[in-house]
Structures are given as C-alpha cells and as structure tokens.
Amino acid sequence: MDGALREREVEEGGTVGGFVEGRWFRNLTLHHQIGITAESKYSHFVDSEGPLDHRVRGVARAEWLWAIADRVRLDTELQSRFVYRNDPVGNGQFRPDINSGITSDLRVFIENSLSLTAGGTIRYNYENPGNAAASSRVDAGLRFGVDYVLSRTLK
C-alpha cells in the first residue's frame, strides 16, 4: 500500500413493505365446504432511481367444495388477482393489472388411487400499462385429467 486514499462507491437499495393475509373456511354440512382467502402486499422500493416506487398486490379467492355423491365432488373457485404499480412510465398514477376468473372441476374417484377430472375456466384480464392503450381479454378453456397416486401414507 502506498498510503493513498482510494475512492469507494457504495450502492444501497431494498424494499420496505408489509402484508396482510386472512383465511376462513367453514363446513356448512357434511357435503358442502366454503372458503374465503384474501391477501394483500405493499412494497416500497427504497432509493429507487426509476419511476416504479410503489406496488400493491392482492389476491381474493372464494371456494366451494360440494360432495355430490360418495365418490363425486364438484370444486368451484372464483378468484381475482390484482397488481397496482406506481406508474411505471413516471406520470405519478397507479396503473392496474387485474386478472379474474371462475374455475369449476368435477372430480370422480374411481378407486383409492385413481380419479378423473373434467372442468372449465373463464378468465378476464385487464391491463393499463400507462404507455399504451388499456387492454382487456376474455379466455375460456376446458380441461380433462387423470390422477393416479402411487402410494398413500395415511393409515
């Protein structure tokens, strides 16, 4: 060392925020169960040099499980996910991105390890990025599935 002072640069950054989450489930009868889940998360980007300083995210979900018969169950879920960003293009407004949908599945249990599923989904997406026109889209789909569990450890 020659004893000369050397210049250093330190860059610090991070995120400060909080979250709230709640879940509630209830068995209405032996054949019906309902549930509600809600969660929200706030983030503030410390020392952000870009226009994105704040973000709020959330999910709201309602579920209904109905045991139609001994080995037949209907699972239905209504869900909405949202993200609000503090204007990623710098105009000082929060911009939404919302994705909502309903899903329903009919599950038939053939034996202890085998089940068949048929279901459908309808989804709606809305986005306002700020630097372009807002857009919305509706999607629909069907699904079929086979689940086979190799072993169960419940005794």
Image (spheres, helix red, strand yellow):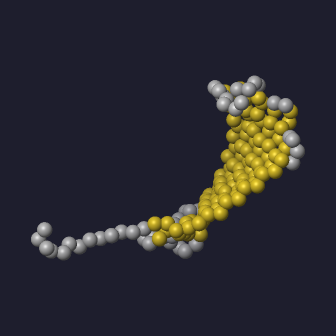
Task: Locate residue 12, reporting x and y percent.
Answer: 39, 69
| Quadrant location, the N terminus | bottom left
Image side of residue 43 versus residue 142, left or right: left
Image side of residue 88 versus residue 103, left or right: left
Task: Locate residue 118, reporting x and y percent.
Answer: 74, 33
- Residue 50 visible, this angle: no
The residue at 74%/50% (across/down) is: 78
Residue placed farthest to the front in the image? 155
- Residue 117 visible, this angle: yes
Against 99, is 103 above or below? above
**Residue 120, picture quadrant:** top right
Task: Locate residue 20, reporting x and y percent.
Answer: 65, 63
Against 17, is 135 above or below? above
**Number of marks in the image?**
0
The residue at 86%/40% (across/down) is: 31
Task: Locate residue 67, reporting x and y percent.
Answer: 83, 38
**Residue 132, picture quadrant:** bottom right
The residue at 71%/59% (across/down) is: 22
Residue placed farthest to the right in the image? 29
